[in-house]
Image (cartoon, coloured by chain):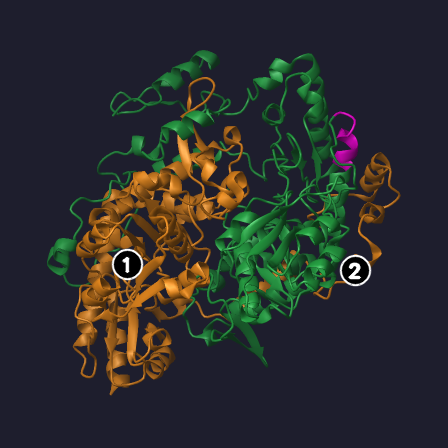
Chain colours: A green, B orange
Amino acid sequence: MERRNSKSLSDTNQRTNEPTYQRTDSSYQRTACGATGLVLEEPTLFEQSVPGRRGISLPAIDVPAFNPCEAFGDLVRDKAPELPELAESDVARHFTRLSTRNFSKDLGFYPLGSCTMKYNPKIANKVAAMPGFADTHPFQPLSSVQGNLRICYELERWLCEITGMNAATLWPAAGSHGELTGMLMIRAYHTARGNPRSKVLIPDSAHGTNPASAVTCHYDVVTVQSGPDGLLDPKAVAEAMDKEVAAIMITNPNTLGVYEENFKAVADIVHAKGGLVYCDGANLNALMGFVKPGEIGADAMHINLHKTFGTPHGGGGPGAGPVAVSRALEPYLPMPRIAKNGDNYTTISDKPESIGRINTFFGNFGVLLRAYVYIRELGAEGLVGVTKMATLNANYVKARLKDAYDLPYSRPSLHECVFSDKRQNAYGVKTLDIAKRLMDYGCHPPTIYFPLIVHGSIMIEPTETECKELLDEFCDAMLTIASECEKTPELVKNAPSRPFRRRLDEAKAARDAVLKE
Amino acid sequence: MRYLPHTNEEIRKMLAVIGAKDVGDLFSSIPKDHRCNPELNIPGGISEQELWAQMNSIAMKNRTLSCSASFIGAGAYRHYIPAAVSELASRSEFTTPYTPYQPEISQGTLQAMFEYQSQICRLFDMDVSNASHYSGATALADAALMARRISKGRKAIIVPDSVHPEYRRVLESVLCDGDSIRLIPSSCGRVDRAKFAAALDGDVAAAVVQFPNFFGIVEDFRDIADSLHKAGALLIAATPEPIAFGILTPPGSWGADIAAGEGLSLGLPVSFGGPTLGIFTTRDQFTRQMPGRICGKTIDAEGREGYVLTLSTREQHIRREKATSNICSNQTLCATTAAIYLSMLGKEGIRELANINAAKADYLKKTLSAIKGVSIPFEARTFNEFVFETAKPAAELLAKLDAQGIIGGVDLGRFYPDTDQMILVCVTEMNTREEMDRYAQVLAQVVR
């Protein structure tokens, strides 16, 4: 096997002037523990594999000898899958080392706009790991999973209360899966009225998942231009609206973090022509206790439990994207529904108008359970406090940065704010550079280049769980970077220099497409 | 509130910087007639200690699988999870970041993704894997959409009824034009070759086969792969139980063009069925048609190896309505868990584990079939699950078994017509011989 890391290691060591430890009897080398300031090069699992090692102990077989070749004949695999062979200690060290290369919410400020990276309460994980929940099966007799069904039933009720909706499904596994589910229901609703219709209106500021979800449901996307103030323009909606429009998809507050003050007017225009209103609930963290989208005209809304309700993002999932709906859409909710008769919880799987199933079993139940724990601990007042402090934090950051960075839209912000790189462009510096430079200051960069309606957008969502000192550290870093852009732009353009890796060559990754070992 | 760090003094200072009198002012952009009652009708907050007590009492309303002898699978299989797997996967460095949009500070998640993709390709004998889908069922639905895109204009998907009933329902919902699914009934628990041939024409984009199928049966699909390929259609393989590939032929070896699967068996708790892990793999030539995140290897500005999310021009955040799928978040933490689990098992461990599963299931199958009044309706090779039939309603037998502390399986009548005297039974390494003998003993009594 080639020594994949030999070049990079010698580089590392020239830089740090630290000794290397080289295994002479094996095919890879790594730096000695702790010798490089705990920044450890780590070969892949496969490079570390040693034939004959294993990391698992299995119980002795207690049934008569079994010969797979006799039992399965030509269906027996001719060669064992080439999984790496490692002892448990090798595996433990490998993944612990990998974990140290991640910036995470528990490590620091993570203002990724539109993602609501709030602190994830530890108690939720502890509850989800309880055998009473983790060791239950979706096809057990319902009488033996009454606790699980109660969690689902009450969570559905609470989400309906928070969003002002009538009923909900908990089974979509993520926000975009919720969008798909919502749009499938909207299609079923129109189909039941004789015409599924052919178009969906989507503002140009929307998340990319909105058009992608609509198209999956066989709809054509009609893009609605935002007004000069970044808001949805009722006139533009009215012009685009006709009897072939199945729905409009609105994010509120929108992806600029600005409240869509024409939401009701737009909903009225759409409803007047028989269309429905889908609300993208990615930004629900800004609304709890202030606005219930169901009360101002939304017919369906997904809720990202991993955003608003603090379940861990897991490096990209699992999340959960329950969809709450108005009375008009309730018959189309996916199966199963959870019902309560007296003190007994049960499931309903035979509603004829339902769109069917959109996931197996009970969706990402472990995530639902964590969200239940979050809501139960915070309670009504706690949730409203979340929205208030999330908005306070975003406005504080906006106030501190607005003199140094261009604010393309001046409307009041709720839970997040969006800047552009216009001023820094004058020094040849782009948003990407600013983002990378932030890493050198110990912060995760904001969301960048989204929403698309802002050139070089920098979308900052601090969330409510961050204290003033941390916000100040971030703002100080952003202000320092703004001044670096003027004085030492090369420093910013070559960032980051401090993390585990410098800028990675994404073009090469796409060109070579090395997707496995 | 312990998750809100703000003191009143800090709030005052922050408001002064903003130039607002109170926090309520910050919401002035919300019109009065949009405002709701600020008092939400949900219970008030409680302390962690009270919460823990309350969650314990709710959990007590569940009966755990370990309280009984459990023989229930049907797509969610209980396997032993080594302590190191849960402990490593629950490190907050893995649980609390999001999608690695910034690779320089996300190399941990990215390398784990790359290693997951590599291990899954080896296990499935496929060329390329994505970084995960939501579940086996949603991966399968996206596979069908992908096959339609590849076949340019062909609509129909052949689906035997031996595919997991819930997978089929998800597929129907997502395709949302039910008539393009050509459902073919099984013959003796296997794909009926004559009906399959009759369903295969020039409008077929792909056929789905499940291995092991919903009845636990493994069958040779090479003939099906051949006839699909001759007809210009694709073979989509679905597997609910990838542990089977420890000893059985993986989809890549029998001609699958897309292989989807459920990875719940790979180190994840059953947890009432989720979070799941959708496995999605394909052949090299279809890489750019795949849905979802994919991690690739590259170098950094100093020439050091590193990993990034790649081929993102397929994805919704770039392509919007022209994306290959609407998927955004996936199940990365579940994939990381699977990567840890598979590296603990290793090449020999997975073979041994698969062998234990098959051996134990074979023992129970033989033991139960020896009972008077119990028969095996489908004579076929099975992995860790099989179907038996009696003259009594399955629901009644299962209730009687349950009363004796045995979760005996799943009533097949729940999913198929005319099968309400059949029970789908699963055996994994978690079931001891003693449990199985007791199952046989009790069944012999109640079946009379």
Q: Quadrant of the C terminus of chain A?
A: top left
Q: Is residue A62 visible?
A: no
Residue A401 within the segment the image draws in magenta: yes
Residues B24 and B233: in front is B233
Q: Within 10 angstroms of label 1, few (less than 14), some, or many (20 or more) residues?
A: many
Label at residue B38: 2
- Which element type, helix, strand or loop, lies under badge 1? strand
Residue B264 within the segment the image draws in magenta: no
Q: Is residue A491 above or below residue B364?
A: above
Q: Give amino acid for label 2.
A: Pro
Q: Quadrant of the N terminus of chain A?
A: top left
Instruction: Give the magenta-colored segment's residue range.
Output: A396-404
Q: Is residue A352 above or below residue B352?
A: below
Q: Give amino acid for label 1.
A: Val
Q: Is residue A133 above or below residue A39?
A: below
- Identify the main secondary structure in magenta: helix
Q: Residue at x 59, y 54 (%)?
A: A200
Residue B341 place in picture, x, y as percent:
36, 46
- Which element type, helix, strand or loop, lies under badge 2? loop
B90 vs A21, left or right, is: right
